[in-house]
Amino acid sequence: MPRPIWTGAISFGLVTIPVRVVAATENHTIAFHQVHLEDMARVRTKKVCEIDGQELGWDDIGRGYEVSKDTIVEITDAELDSMPLPTAKAIDIVAFVAAETIDPVRVGAGYYLEAAGQVAAKPYKLLRMALERSSKVAVAKFAWHNRERLGLLRVRDDVIVLHAMHWDDEIRSPETLAPKQVELSDDEVDAAIQLLETMAQDDISHLRDHYREAVEEMLTAKSEHRKPKPVEGEAAEPAGKVVDLMAALTESMEAAKKARGETGTGDATVHDLPKKRAAKKAAPVKKAAAKKTAAKKATAKKTAGRRSRSA
């Protein structure tokens, strides 16, 4: 388990729960260095004063805020730490809400909260069980990286997880992004739902980062002076203009079923809409059937007339 990146306490009414914050995720991104192509030497970034051109070390660098074009005021760590914020060393729970009321776009990175010592064990478990049984999540405020943040507390595998959240004024409105004046038939919507159901899975833990694996294999091959081995996964076809939406849905569904090892069309088969040519061919059959029906009715009328005269 990585080292704690923050220590403080959860403030739950009059209850205080000492906790340590631990990163819940790992970054597996492959990092590249900038190099000089002529000799492959590393390219370094230097901190240089723009007035005298002097190269600076970390001890020479502070924090400043630009008030105007020609005025910058210095802000020290001590000044920021001394600000009278109740959330400076606390995760202050301000509300409990239903989980479904939280817009996922507001939720950011996740961190595990570890009970700090035996004294925190009982109140920690109390909060965890209260969240589980109420089916709610906690909304909290906390100060981190020189700003007060909004947070979300939920339970995962008996551990309380803290998610950083965006404030309301940080969320952009998407109203201008949705496509307008688009017509869809019920058949197309039903086909899309059937495709969704065909691709539905209860577990996605098997998904892998094929791109990272391919890059790792390429780097290993280059270091060993050989050609890279083929990596699992098929290259995606270039995106193009969809001409027949129903045909694309049908093909996608068959591909999804094939990937899951299913055979046959089953209940999820999507049928194309009847085409005009098929309708024209069927028309004479309908006319012929109509003529036969009319002839039967005329014969029946004549027979009925003869019977009435005979009577």
Image (cartoon, rainbow, N blue to C red):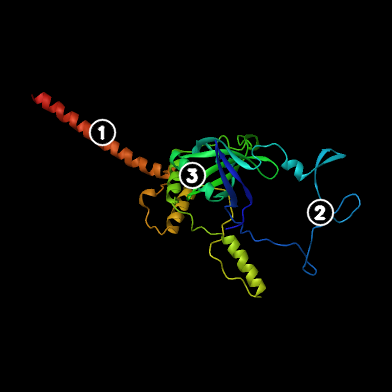
Locate the N terminus by quadrant.
bottom right
Closer to viewer: mark 2 or mark 1: 2
Kindly indicate whether the residue at mark 1 contacts the one at mark 2 (C-beta within 8 angstroms): no
Q: Which residue is mark 1?
A: 294
Most extreme residue toward the bottom is: 225
Question: Label for residue 128?
Answer: 3
Locate the C terminus by quadrant.
top left
Most extreme residue toward the left is: 311
Disc 1 residue type?
Ala
Q: Is residue 243 above or below residue 30?
A: above
Q: Earlier in the sequence, mark 2 or mark 1?
A: 2
Disc 3 residue type?
Arg
Q: Is residue 160 visible?
A: no
Q: Residues within 10 Å of mark 3 (few under 14, many from 20)?
A: many
Tell me the distance, in whole angstroms, between the alpha carbons under discs 2 and 3: 43 Å
Q: Earlier in the sequence, mark 2 or mark 3?
A: 2
At numbered mark 2, what does the secondary structure look like: helix, strand or loop? helix
Most extreme residue toward the front is: 119
Q: Position of residue 252 (x, y in %)?
A: 47, 52
Q: What residue sits 51% from the left and 35% below the top? A: 97
Q: Which residue is mark 2?
A: 59
Disc 2 residue type?
Asp
Q: Is residue 212 visible?
A: yes
Quarter of the image where one finds residue 27: bottom right
Q: Position of residue 70 (x, y in %)?
A: 88, 39
